[in-house]
Every structure is written in structure tokens, then in C-alpha cells.
Image (cartoon, helix red, strand yellow):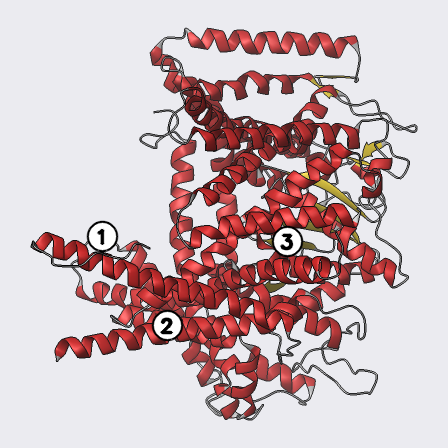
Amino acid sequence: MNEHYTFWKMTAGVLCTVGLYSVLYRENKFYRFFEHIFLGLAAGYAIVALWTENLKEGWYDLLVGSQGTAGHSGPNGYYLYALLLPIGLMGYFVFSKKHSWMSRIPIGIVLGLWSGQQVQVWWNRYGGQIQDSIKPMVPTVWSPAFKPDAAGMDPKLAANVANNVYISDAVTNIIFVITLLAVLSYFLFSFDVKNKAIRGFSTLGRYLLMIGFGAIFGSTVMMRFSLVIDRMYYIWIEWLMNHVMHGKF
Amino acid sequence: MTFSFPNGSSGLYLALAATLIVGFLAMFAMMSMPARWRRPVVATCTFLAGAIYVAYYLWPKPQAFGPRDIPQNFSESVGSYLADSVNVAGTISTALTTFLLGLGIYSLVRIHGRKLLRMQKDWGFSLVLLISMVAIVIFGYWSYWQTKFGPDAVKLQLSSNWTWVNYTNDFLFDGLLQQMESAMFSIIAFYILSAAYRAFRIRSVEATILLASALIMMLSLMGAVEFIWNSHLPATGFAANFQITEIARWIRDTLQTPGIRALDFGIGLGALAMGLRLWLSLERGGVSA
Amino acid sequence: MDTPQDPVARTAEEVQVFEAAKIEKKTHQTRMILFGLLILCSTIPLFLTLGVPNKPTQSTVDLYSTLMSVPDNSTVLLQTDWTLSTRGESGGEFEGLMRVLMRKNCKIALYSMSDAQAPQVAIDEIALLLNPERKAKGEREYKAWDDYISLGFFPNAEGETASMAANLRSAWTGKKAIDVQGQEEDVFQSPVLKNVQTIANVPLVVIITATNSFNVLIERLAGKVPVIALVTGVMGPESNVYYSSKQIQGLAIGMKGVYDLETMMEEGINSPGKDGKVAFEWPNHPPVAGFPGETNYGRGKLYFPTLHIDMTLMILAVIFGNVGMFMAKKRGNR
């Protein structure tokens, strides 16, 4: 890829970034111009990808098969896949007042395929987590209270230390289980509950949930700032320093 | 019966034509179907689609059964048939989802096309949108054809051999679309900073807990803070528990993880219930309603 | 921002409008100052060569160990669900991961379940960044077909991942790539997938994601094959629950994860360097070698110091916001 082209491509990228960032000052026509280019390109790319990335190999090639090369016989064409065309097109009846019900057939099939998987995937996703949430809450060793540092220990002894439940572990596990149950009760008993104990437990759940949300906030901030840093790197280092300042245009 | 013919054979073309004719005839027949049949038709399609996976999960799976092995008995035959069906279901799902994705694009074109034709307010922006869309569609397909099926397909795998068509496509995709997507995503950081300054206040117990947790999380992500804090504490022994990395780890493993896990359980139970209701068409306002 | 016109306000309504405009103007000014500061804080440190100490986290240590335990020359499945929109984090994760896999001569089958643009972005990273880097050092370039193949994008993650778990060969039937002769050929003819029959034949599945496509993968593949994940900060807390329950074998989260990975690529884990000293110690962990002196540092080292400054700005913004609130309250009480 020649430098001349790379420079102009990058310059366009910088212009687009500045155009979109202009909304930070206020909503303006410059921003809306770039916003519409963005929407148009994204939709256009999706049109291209629908065929090139999905239907061509995921449907059409299965439908017609292929010749095969270098001594390998290609797979046959499975003609029944052609039925997916009329079924898929039924989705477009959503715009017809009279026949809009037919659009529910492809949607129903897709939702059916999704819902049929739910019991199994539920277990795959949550089974391991449920298992991991059942933690020992009674210490197996009462002294010392804290888990000793196993660094430099004999491997057998270190394994023992790792398997034992010390008082500190038991307390941590109790807090873990209480947090899990309290937050869960906050969700499950979101309706008006008369029982004071459950209400109190749910309130505790709400407080504990805030700790989780705090972590999500901190982590989200890290991500968003990283993206701004990357944009700045693109503009100031990749474009300005590496291209403009080096005369690569 | 494999429902297949070799590529390019007349048998395949005939079968394809017949399948399409049957498919479209069935579609037209449905258009004039009595209203009372509609719900059962949609419910049956939904149920049968889901039943493939349910049957696959419930049927005993042959142990160590490879894709090239031949089934030995009835149980293995059904098991292998169901495993193949899951892949067919995957293809059906992929193709139908793709056809349905086209709906969104059709809708976008309809809205902006109408705006443009009627010269409604801001029609110029609609024109910009449609031109951008058409441009990337033309150059996207053209470039795809050149690099996949054109006479110089192999040569064009190297960017040094690109034609102006490939360059234009790359300019639109990599030069504009990707950069704008990146800019759009990063803009949120500015609003988060502004919102944090104006609204992240210690006004209630919940807000205070949230703020404290977020602060510890942010500090623990800063290697320099971690280094300075931890350098005042020993690496082993009881005091080592007060290293910021240890505090953050304890909070994460003991309070954040179960909190988020419980949140996830709640969502999971909802999704499971919704899945079953949709599959059995029990959902009010669902697809078969 | 238009200057609010004072003043001789006549009605209560006019006074209210005037006050609202004043507040709006002040808010706008504050916002502009904050935005300006963020741009400065995200730019200036990039020009300075700042070094920041780092101690990798447990989840990234496990990620690196798992990655290094993959046999050399084996085939790894890489679900690459990111585009340039999250290059700041995912780009660094992808580059670090690929550098390790390339040094181990692993073959890579990449695909996306989340974004149609993602496979192209990954291919571009290999062609425009990683291969020139290897070429400059006199190393073998990674070739499409022989060393890696792209299976493209699958729009229906749920159905496709379920198919992959049931029968990988059937799931990817019809997928083609251009071979070394320039012919379109079935992907299972390529050296990358030639010996792969089922998902169990693969020693590792790696996912780099900026979306919840990760959940779909866990639901359908976890337990059938070892999985490691490199996720964005937003996905971090949500993904950590799978790591803590051992449903995945390792996890790198956001920019910190990138820098952790780069640190271990340089220093290894409990691995003595040329001087015989262990640069990065991790208690009770077997030694895992690094690649000292190679191109290990990338976006992690470049962006992490800048991230510190930005985080400090955020913390200060929150503190000043609260101090302002208390002072305003105090004034109000008086």
C-alpha cells in the first residue's frame, strides 16, 4: 500500500474524527453530515456482508454444492435449502397490513431455534457458577486465623494449606454467600413483600449490588478512556508525527 | 434419501426449481389461509424449530463418536441424525437471521428515500446517507468479485497489486467507516467524565457505596498507585492483606462477583422462562399471538 | 453559547428563563473545560516516554500460562469479535495474543460471531502490522491458508456455536478460502484445519470480544474445550464471574489486561532472565518462559501511562464535584 494513499486515507479518518467530535461543542451541521455518512456506510457495508459473509457460503454454496478441485469431489447441492428463500421473504410481509402475520413464521422459527437451546445453555452457563457459589462456611482449621503464606513451603504442606479452610476463608465465604443471596432476593422479591426480614435482606442486597455496579463503572471508565487515548494516538502520533511531520504524503 | 444432487447437474437445477415453486406456492396459499389457522401454523413452526435442539440435548449421545464413524444401532443412528440436524438448524437459523437483517436496511432506505423524494426537512442529509450507502455497496461487491472470482484474484490478495476499485473500497471501509465507528465509541468517555463531575455525588448510602467501590476499582487499575501503596507494606504476612491489589481482589472476589452473579442469575431465570414460553407459544403478544 | 440578556426582568417567568440560561451557560463552560482537559490528558503523555510499574493480576497470569501451554504448531480457534471501534483495548489484546501464537508457530482459524467487519480487521492487523514486524526481524511471515484462515462472519452466534459443539466439520461445511495456488478450496483442506475433526481436537479456543458474544460461547462450548478470553473493560466484571467459577481458564480485562500480557511476554512468570534473576514472581506457580528482548510491548505500554492521567482526571472530577456540592450546601445553610 503506497504512502501517498495511506496518508490521504488517514487524513480522511482524522477529518471524520474531528467532524464527529464537533458534537462535543454542540449539535451542528458538520457533525450531522459525518453522522449520515457513517450511517450510510454502516448500512451499505451490512448489505455487502449479508451476501459475502453470510448467505454466499452459509446458504448459497450449500444449496448448489461445488465442483471440487485437485482430485477432491465437491459436496453435493442440498436443494431443500431453497425453501429458506420464500420463508425468509415472508419476513418482509411485516410492511403489509393484510399479510403481516406471515412475517411471524420466519421470526417464530428463529425464536424457536433460540428457545429450544435455552434449558441446556442455561445449565452450561449457570451450572458452573451455582457449583462455585456453594462454598464451605465452617473452618477446618481454627488456628492460625489467616491462611499462611505457602511460598517456599514443602509442596505437600503447601497443598494442605491450600485445601484447608481457615477462619478468614470461612468469613470470606459467608460474606460471599450472603451477598449472592441478598442480591438475588432483591431481584426475586422485587414486588411488595410484607415480611420485614426479607425486606431488610433485599435492602442489604441493594447496597451490596452497588459494589458490583461500582466495579462496572470503574471498568467502563477504563475502556472508554482507552478508546479516547487510541483516537488521540491515531491523530497525533500515527497521522501527525509519523506522516505529516515526516513528509510522508 | 439425501435430498441432494451433484453441483451443476440437471437434476439439481430441476430439484431447485421444483423446491422454489413449491415454496412460493405454499407462500401464496398461506396468503389466502383462514385467519383461525394462522396461530397454529406459527406455533407449529416455532415448536418444531425448538424441538430439534430439545431432542438433541435429551437423546443419549454416543460416546467418542466421531463425525466419520458409522452408527452401530438405533440409538446411535438417531443420535448422529440429531447431531446432523443441529447443523442444519444452524444453517436455517443463519440464513433466516440474515434475511431478517435485511429488514432493517430496507426500513432505513424507505425512510430516507421518502424524505429525499418529498424534499422534507434535512433531505440533504438523507441524500448523503444514500450516496454513502450506494457507494460502499457498489465498491464492496465489485472488490469482492475481483478478489474472489476475478481473473487476478490471487494477485489481488497482495495490497501492492490492488486496483482502484480495491483502493476505493478500502478507503470507504477502513478510511471512513472504521475510523468513524472508533470516534463514535470514544465520544462516550467525554460524557461519562462530565456526568461523573455533575452527578456522581455522595447523596445517599447507595451512591456512597457505588462511589467507594468505583474509586477502589480505578485505583487498583493504576499500576503507579499500586506500586506506591504496596511499597509501604510487606509482601508477606498479615499486613500484606492491606496491599491495594489484595483489597481490590478481595472486594472483587467476595462482593462484586457474587453481586454480578446474582444479577446474572436473575436475568438467566427470566431468559429461561421466556425461552420456554416462546417455544410453547404461551407468551402473550408472542410470535404466534 | 448565546449570552443571556439581562435584565430588567419583569415577570417571574422571565426571571426563571434568565436563570435557566445562566445555569445552562455555566454548565456548558464547565463541560467544555472538562472535555478540553480530557483531550489534553489523553494527548500529552503520549509524547512522553513514561514507564509505569505493573503487577499482573491472577486472571491474566492464568491466561498467559494457558496460552503458553498450548503445544507448538497446534491449531487454535480464535473468535475475533472486535473492530477498530475498540482498537484501544481489543487491538492491544489481539496483537499481544498473536505475537505469542506466531512465536509458537500455532495455526489459527479465525472467525467472528459478532460483527461482519471483524474478520477483515483481524486479517488487516496480521497483514499490515504483525507480518511487517516479523519481516523486519527476518522471521517467517504468517501466510493465509498455510498458517491462518478466516472463516468469516456468522450472524447467528447461538445456532452456529451450538453446531460447532455438535459437529465442527458439518458446522463449517461449505466454508472456503483461497489456497496457495489461488484456487478456492474447502477450509478443511488447509493445513490449519486438516487434522481437526471435532472441537475436542482443538487445544484452545480464544475469544477477543467487545460484546456479550462471550456469553453465547460459554453457554455452548465451555467444558468441551479450554477457553481463554480477552475482553474490554466494559465486559470485565461480567466476564470475571466465569473466570472465578473456572468455566474459562484465563481472562484479560481491558487496558490493564493488555499491559499485564505484555509484561509477562517480556518477563515470563517465575522465569529467570539472562542475569539469572526472576523479574516477575508469582507465588506457587511453575515457571513459564517469556520472550525477553522480542517485540513484546505494544499498545499496553503506550497507553497505560496515559490511562493513569485520565483516571486521575476522573477521580479529581468526582472529588471536585462533591466538594462543590458540599460548599454549595454550606452556603445554602448560611
Q: Which amino acid does label 3 sit on?
A: Ile
Q: Name the residue under label 1.
A: A191
Q: Residue at x 68, y 83 (%)?
A: C281
Q: Name the residue under label 3.
A: C207
Side of C323 where B76 appears, left or right: right
Q: Which chain carries label 2?
A: C
Q: Which amino acid does label 1 sit on?
A: Phe
How far apart marks 3 and 1 lie (CA) works out to 39 Å
Q: Residues within 10 Å of mark 3 (few under 14, many from 20)?
A: many
Q: Looking at the image, is A22 positioned above or below residue A67?
A: below
Name the quarter where the C terminus of chain B is drawn. Answer: top left
Image marks 3 and 2: residues in contact by CB distance under 8 Å: no
Judged by depth in the image, the label closer to the viewer, 2 or 1, is 2
Name the quarter where the N terminus of chain B is drawn. Answer: top right
Question: Is label 2 on the same chain as label 1?
Answer: no
Side of A60 where B194 appears, left or right: left
Disc number for residue C318:
2
- In percent of width and height, residue C128 lies at 77, 52
Most distant residue in the left direction: C11
Q: Looking at the image, is A109 positioned above or below residue C92?
A: above
Q: What residue type is labelled 2?
A: Val
- In percent of width and height, residue B151 lies at 86, 26
Q: Is mark 2 on a helix, strand or loop?
A: helix
Which of B126 and A120 lies nearest the eye of the viewer? Answer: B126
Q: Earlier in the sequence, mark 3 or mark 2?
A: 3
Judged by depth in the image, the label closer to the viewer, 3 or 1, is 3
Image marks 3 and 1: residues in contact by CB distance under 8 Å: no
Q: Is mark 3 on a helix, strand or loop?
A: strand
How far apart marks 2 and 1 lie (CA) works out to 34 Å
Residue C177 image-quadrant placement: top right
